Image: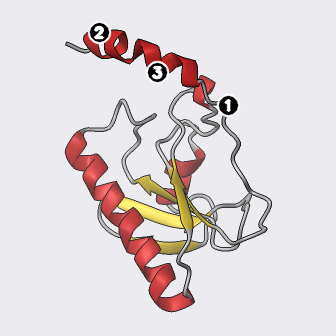
Amino acid sequence: MDCIFCKIVQGEAKSWKVYEDQRAYAFLDINPVSEYHTLVIPKKHYENIFDIPEDELMKVMTVVKKVVSLYNRKLGISNVQVGNSSGAEAQQDVFHLHFHIVPRSKGDQQDIQWTTHKEWRTRFDDLLSKLQ
């Protein structure tokens, strides 16, 4: 397998480790959008959020919480975005499940702009009926 994140976990590729436990690994993003921009990954290879079992996902999310708490306690960081993209059309670029922790500050020019569709509100009942 030619997965860069698997290579990082195995010590075959360089990383800047922030935190590690038996199931997950957190390291600074090599292409940061802010200081302390961090990736949290499961040590086992899962392509995206659809592939990972719930119990494994909970372990990864526990590490996300530990890292943001560490940043808050040690650095005073109190504004973060936590994000995941699963699938090519969702702009996933490395196909090993990962979560971004992006510390944010006023004026950092990292604003995410989404196009909203208020007209879709009229379809909510229909949308929910498809889940029954």
- Write the residue at 69% across / 47% down: 112
Q: Is residue 107 shown left or right of residue 80? A: right
In-front residue for pair 30/131: 131
For the residue marked with disc 1, what is the amino acid?
A: Thr
- Write the residue at 30% across / 17% down: 128
Label 2 to label 1, Cα distance in Å?
24 Å
The mark that comes first in sequence, 2 or 3, is: 3
Label 2 to label 3, Cα distance in Å?
15 Å
Q: Is residue 61 shown left or right of residue 72? A: left
- Write the residue at 56% across / 18% down: 119
Q: Quadrant of residue 122?
A: top left
Tell me the SS state at disc 1: loop
Tag nearer the camera, 2 or 3: 3
The mark that comes first in sequence, 3 or 1, is: 1
Residue 110 in picture, x, y percent from top left:
74, 57
Instruction: Find disc 3 in the rendering and name its residue.
Output: 121
Q: How many dots with numbers?
A: 3
Quarter placement of the C terminus: top left
Instruction: Find disc 1 in the rendering and name its residue.
Output: 115
Residue 16 in picture, x, y percent from top left:
60, 72
In-front residue for pair 78/43: 78
Residue 130: mark in rendering: 2
Q: Quadrant of residue 48?
A: top left
